[in-house]
Amino acid sequence: MTLLDVLRHQWHQRTRSPTFGRSLIGGLLLLLAAAYFGSLFVAVGWFFPEIMAEVAPEQDPLRLLNEFLLYGAVGLVPMRFFLQRSAGSDVRPYLPLPLRRAQVVRILQMLSSLSLLNLLPVVVLASLWGRTVLPATSAMGAAFWAIGALLLVATTQFLNGLLRAVWDRHAGLVLGAAGLLAVVVAGGSWTGGQLLQSASAGLFGGLAAGRILPMTLLFAGTAALAVAAHRMLRGGFTACWGIRSKLGGRLRGPSRGWGTDGAASCRWRCWT
């Protein structure tokens, strides 16, 4: 099974649904709203140097952008959590198939990444990169900054998958982590330390200067979150795959009893 097979199946499933008309209208309205607000953000990104020249001429646009990129990533994570579908929300139709958990997790993660919450940040960052970063840095610095910005978007994607998987098992951990982050950010602002702003300036300022260490840190952090999200999602499949193993290992199809009874008896908490 490939990503194209899953996309084809999802399309047939939606077109054959009795609520397809309402879903189509809702999807079109959502797409129009995303296009409208996305175009506004892209315009702000494209004219960001001119806006800064009018509002705060003493400020360096690139420095100010680097200082607040991590704030944008922190704001994107809760938006993903509440608006983006979980990677495991569409798993049930594929449980009867003779597929390995790792393969199903990878495909569903790729399916979850096909989201407007990935497209819009990338387009906005591209407009900022073309008008603010590229004219003010070297070719290597601009390339490092672009790669780092893409890794930051990917980090929020993997972090959302990890949080959704942890939420299903220990919701208190997610709430506690969110509260701790809010306290750290607010405390840093109240004390004048502005930890997140300093970290953002150091990270993306270093990328714009063509330094290797910030790039290494971003690669390592993104890879660690990707592995953690993958393992947590695989762990969420354990109960269902355990039932399939009791029914005969890697089944060759639903005719061996897995198609109806196994799926019904499986306690699927997060992705039902």
Image (cartoon, grey):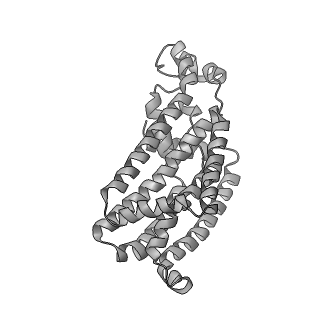
Q: Is residue 220 above or below residue 38?
A: above
Please name whichever residue, 206 or 2, is drawn nearer the observer in this view of the structure. 206
Q: Is residue 131 above or below residue 141?
A: below
Instruction: Name the residue at 28% across, 66% down.
Output: 140
Q: Is residue 199 above or below residue 99?
A: below
Task: Report the side of 154 relative to 37 (left or right).
Answer: left
At which x and y percent is residue 167? 63, 38
At which x and y percent is residue 186? 64, 58
Please name whichever residue, 104 or 50, is drawn nearer the observer in this view of the structure. 50
Instruction: Name the residue at 62% across, 66% down.
Output: 32
Please name whichever residue, 48 or 70, is drawn nearer the observer in this view of the structure. 70
Q: Quadrant of residue 117?
A: bottom right
Residue 83 visible, this angle: no
Q: Quadrant of residue 3?
A: top left
Q: Quadrant of residue 263?
A: top right
Q: How many labels sit on residues?
A: 0
At which x and y percent is residue 231? 48, 33
Residue sticking out furthest to the front = 191
Quarter of the image for the C terminus: give it. top right
Quarter of the image for the N terminus: give it. top left
Instruction: Name the residue at 61% across, 69% down.
Output: 37
Please name whichever residue, 183 or 71, is drawn nearer the observer in this view of the structure. 183
Task: Report the side of 154 relative to 260 (left or right).
Answer: left
At which x and y percent is residue 58? 49, 83
Task: Report the side of 227 relative to 96 (left or right).
Answer: left
Task: Report the side of 124 relative to 192 (left or right).
Answer: left
Residue 77 visible, this angle: yes
